[in-house]
Image (cartoon, grey):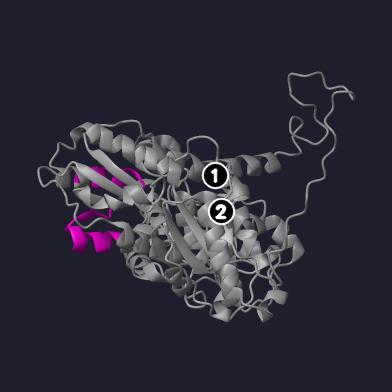
Amino acid sequence: MQLSVWTYEGPPHVGAMRVATAMEGMHYVLHAPQGDTYADLLFTMIERRGKRPPVTYTTFQARDLGKDTAQLFQDAARDALERFKPQAMMVGASCTAELIQDDPAGLAEAMRLPCPVIPLELPSYQRKENWGAAESFYQIVRKLADTAITPRGEKRALVNILGPAALGFRHRDDVIEVRKILDTLGIEVNMVAPLGASPADIARIGAADFNIVLYPEIGDEAARWLEKTFHQPAIRTVPIGVGATREFITGVAALAGVDPEPALGDSSSRMPWWSRSVDSTYLTGKRVFIFGDATHAVAAARIAQEELGFVVCGLGCYNREFARDVRAAAKKYGVEPLITDDHMEVEDAIAAASPELVLGTQMERHIAKRFGMPCAVISSPVHVQDFPARHSPQMGFEGANVIFDSWVHPLVMGLEEHLLVMFRDDFEFSDEAGPSHHAAHSPKTAAPKVEIEEPASEGELWTEEASRELKKIPFFVRGKARRNTEAFAAEQGRAEIDIATLYDAKAHYAR
């Protein structure tokens, strides 16, 4: 076991909580010590939900370990049933409670509760959060689906949307955009699950003609069981980006037997127009490093290289269950895949690649900030600011607009900041200048003097003077200049990089 100050995924019982919290009429009884109730904060503080997650903890303490902790679990289950009156109940143990081996599944079965009980066996020390969410959703579907209900068999115009859950990156907004596409195609939604679904809804999941797997990390395992049990085919194209959205529409329309043109004719996305415009040329070829969950990382790589004209210089994911997809994408874009859940490895890879833009999780945002690189968040785990109150999807044509804004703006703002630093001695931009060149420049209106922080050192190889000189180079070519200079210094056998080495390297590569 490795001690870390950051983890990309929580233990699997957190994934189960995400599924329970997403649903209506479901309750999760979690055998857990007092400290494990921290998980509530993920939903009330990070996702800003208006109510607590539907989870009852046994909250046993150290002094309870000498007693019958199994009885504590049974009491908690009875109290939860009486108080919340759920349609169904999930039972399981947290990673800490797993060590005392009380077997919540067996205990719940022995109680013969008057509602369906879904026992969860989640190996906390072998698996993680996304797997826990997928396994929980699969067990719910397998337990509650009424196998007597089958697809209508007329035309495939009734669909399930699988995978959206609580604490998901823009899941709520993505569902809205996907529903709009389906409405345009005349396709009816049987249910969205687990987000917003009740146990009664899950019972009729077999009525749909086919499934849309929006988030494979959560919905794919259940979709495969539904494929075998109800012979429901599945669409696994994730509509993130203009190209993928068009493929998604075409695939869905083909399964439903409808004309895709009404949805394909949507011209609301500005990304294709901008990518062809002269304004995009100063960002074309920018090197981008991508890391996140596999679904969003692979989608981001396609958008970056094929739709925005960036160059993928790094690609990776933290969920090993989907490493094959990332390896295939990395091979396509000619980079070495990075499959790890160690943020220090990711930090080292970003430093080595020296990209102009980082696309990642909340952790990569911190890493990029330390390196002075622009960054946009594309995947969980995320901060509260990545659950905006406004509509901000990632999927569909409107999602492509959001992606366009959130990726391009850090680059443009970085350029603006660089220009302000370059011209800080100009009479209009200096620290002593007034608030505007239209304002009267009197001592009363002059802006307060702001101390500009000195650039950070590039490392032991670079002298402080050379490091400051490097910072004068525009950010969008600075990485290349640094790499070239370091390569030149190594070739020449120079122990350090001073200003002379910097300009010698510039002259060398200018020949």
Q: Is residue 194 magenta?
A: no
Q: Looking at the picture, does residue 365 appear above or below residue 65?
A: above
Secondary structure beneath label 2: loop
Q: Position of residue 496 (x, y in %)?
A: 69, 73
Q: Main secondary structure of the magenta part?
A: helix
Residue name at image x 59 percent, y 62 percent: 57
The label number, if any, that marks residue 387 in the structure image: 1
Q: Are marks 2 and 1 in contact (CB under 8 Å)?
A: yes
Residue name at image x 48 percent, y 65 percent: 91
Q: Looking at the picture, does residue 451 appear above or below residue 499?
A: above
Q: Position of residue 209 (x, y in %)?
A: 18, 48
Q: Position of residue 138 (x, y in %)?
A: 35, 62
Q: Looking at the picture, does residue 346 appear above or below residue 55?
A: below
The answer to whether residue 381 is seen in the rendering is: no
Range of the magenta residues? 222-250
Residue wearing tag 2: 382
Residue name at image x 66 percent, y 78 percent: 67
Residue name at image x 74 percent, y 24 percent: 436
Horizontal arrangement in the rendering, residue 359 relative to residue 207 (left or right): right
